[in-house]
Image: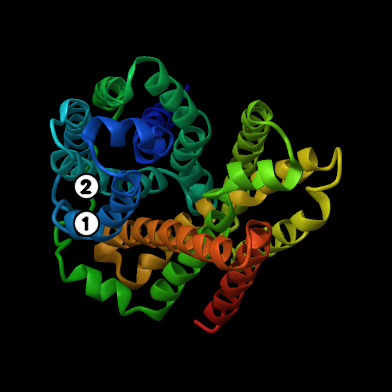
């Protein structure tokens, strides 16, 4: 196995742990609320607050680490990740838990932003999309498999044990990065400063790509956030069956991530437009096929296939587009992480509004509309 693949695996396994800790509180909201003596709504801030802290804090923090050698940076970040998750496990109060989660989110964002730049810079242009898909693959597998396992562990031995296990995973990942990433891994640049955020955003090609990322990711999370109740109400399947249907969804998400990585190598806006169109069409037809007996399985498989297929293309496009601001590649990558998190928050918010005022069954239509908006931004990008 080549050195590149060893590094890619070490970084992907790290993003698996990172992705697990981001969403695992979703399945433990009630337990944490009861233990902390606060409302379930306040515990929900452990997820939404995480996304906001990552979206705001990651670009700012990333702007200060340009001079740090990559191996040193990655090991520092994974060690901090492990310590912060253990701190979450033993947090005596809700306020302290919120703080440790926010700090973990910033570590998450900086690691993903800098690791994706480092990994994609190891390969030629026609392989950058595939390189980005390694890291998104870690996040994807975490969302689909790591989070359910963490939730199960929380049910059996308590929510604190889940955070402790994720902390142990972080230490294992720290060791993997220490072993696999060479000492010769140089800093990204020497002049990555806070003002680089403004420099990057002022470039229309970059800012429009960030908007496209927010809309593309948001289109998926309109439905994904509420996929459990949606499947139960629309298809009428049991709670037990939902678990296995979501496993099917996860398998096809993984397949879609692999396909998306190969497509991303083409560095084409047309590829992204095709992915967004596929998302819109697949979500748009769900109302017609999910309620029909026997059709919900292929319907869910299609949803999973296209859900995150565009992620690698979005990340690699941001990295290659930073030729317009070459001294700020890490910051641009961090801003893409922010854009994706704003997509999560925005998609979830739209889904909640649609569910509350129109009805659960119309969630796929709302997601399809947002996907079409992403296509519109992609079309606008062709002018630059």
Q: Residue at x 32, y 20 (%)?
A: 158
In terms of depth relative to the viewer, which is nearer, 29 or 189? 29
In terms of depth relative to the viewer, which is nearer, 347 or 256? 347
Q: Residue furthest bottom?
A: 383
Residues at discs 2 and 1 in contact (Cβ within 8 Å): yes
Of labels 2 and 1, the one closer to you: 2
Q: Residue at x 68, y 33 (%)?
A: 245
Q: Where is residue 143 in the image (x, y as percent from the top left)?
A: 48, 37
* Residue 15 in view (yes/no): no
Q: Position of residue 337 (x, y in %)?
A: 36, 55
Asked where in the image residue 322 lies, by quadrant, the reply is bottom left
Work out how far the residue at label 2 is from the one at label 1, CA to CA, in angstroms.
9 Å
Asked where in the image residue 198 lies, by quadrant, the reply is bottom left
- Secondary element under disc 1, as helix, strand or loop, is helix
Q: For this view, does 283 lie left or right of residue 331?
A: right
Q: Which mark is residue 15?
A: none
Q: Which residue is drawn at 30% across and 72% down?
A: 200
Q: Which mark is residue 102?
A: 2
Q: Where is residue 41 in the image (x, y as percent from the top left)?
A: 34, 49
Q: For this view, does 285 lie left or right of residue 383?
A: right
Decide: is 272 above or below 308. below
Q: Where is residue 209 in the image (x, y as percent from the top left)?
A: 46, 70
Decide: is 88 above or below 375. above
How many callouts does the rendering have?
2
Identify the mark nearer the N-term, 2 or 1.
1
* Residue 6 in view (yes/no): yes
In terms of depth relative to the viewer, which is nearer, 105 or 276? 105
Q: Which mark is residue 57?
A: 1
Q: For this view, does 280 lie left or right of residue 198?
A: right
């Amino acid at each position: 196995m080549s050195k590149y693949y060893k590094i890619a695996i070490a970084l992907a396994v790290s993003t698996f742990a990172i992705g697990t800790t981001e969403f695992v509180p979703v399945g433990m909201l009630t337990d944490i609320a009861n233990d902390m003596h606060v409302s379930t709504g306040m515990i929900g801030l452990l997820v939404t607050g995480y996304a906001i802290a990552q979206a705001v804090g990651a670009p700012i923090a990333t702007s200060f680490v340009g001079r740090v050698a990559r191996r040193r940076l990655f090991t520092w970040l994974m060690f901090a990740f492990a310590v912060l998750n253990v701190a979450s496990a033993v947090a005596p109060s809700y306020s302290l838990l919120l703080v440790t989660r926010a700090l973990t989110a910033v570590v998450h964002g900086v690691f993903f932003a800098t690791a994706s730049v480092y990994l994609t810079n190891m390969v030629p242009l026609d392989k950058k999309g595939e390189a980005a898909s390694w890291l998104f693959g870690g996040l994807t597998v975490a969302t689909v498999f790591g989070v359910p396992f963490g939730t199960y562990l929380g049910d059996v031995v308590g929510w604190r044990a889940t955070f402790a296990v994720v902390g142990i995973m972080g230490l294992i990942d720290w060791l993997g990065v220490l072993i696999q990433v060479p000492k010769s891994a140089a800093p990204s640049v020497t002049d990555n400063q806070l003002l680089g955020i403004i420099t990057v955003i002022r470039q229309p090609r970059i800012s429009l790509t960030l908007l496209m990322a927010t809309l593309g990711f948001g289109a998926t999370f309109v439905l994904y956030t509420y996929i459990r109740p949606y499947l139960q109400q629309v298809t009428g399947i049991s709670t037990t069956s939902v678990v296995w249907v979501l496993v099917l969804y996860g398998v096809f998400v993984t397949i879609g991530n692999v396909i998306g990585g190969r497509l991303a190598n083409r560095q084409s806006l047309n590829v992204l437009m095709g992915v967004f169109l596929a998302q819109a069409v697949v979500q748009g037809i769900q109302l017609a096929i999910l309620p029909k007996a026997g059709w919900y399985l292929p319907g869910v498989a299609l949803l999973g296939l296209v859900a995150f297929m565009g992620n690698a293309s979005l990340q690699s496009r941001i990295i290659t587009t930073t030729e317009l601001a070459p001294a700020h590649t890490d910051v641009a990558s961090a801003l893409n992480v922010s854009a994706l998190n704003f997509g999560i928050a925005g998609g979830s918010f739209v889904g909640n509004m649609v569910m509350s005022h129109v009805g659960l069954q119309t969630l796929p239509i709302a997601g399809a509309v947002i996907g079409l908006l992403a296509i519109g931004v992609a079309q606008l990008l062709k002018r630059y």
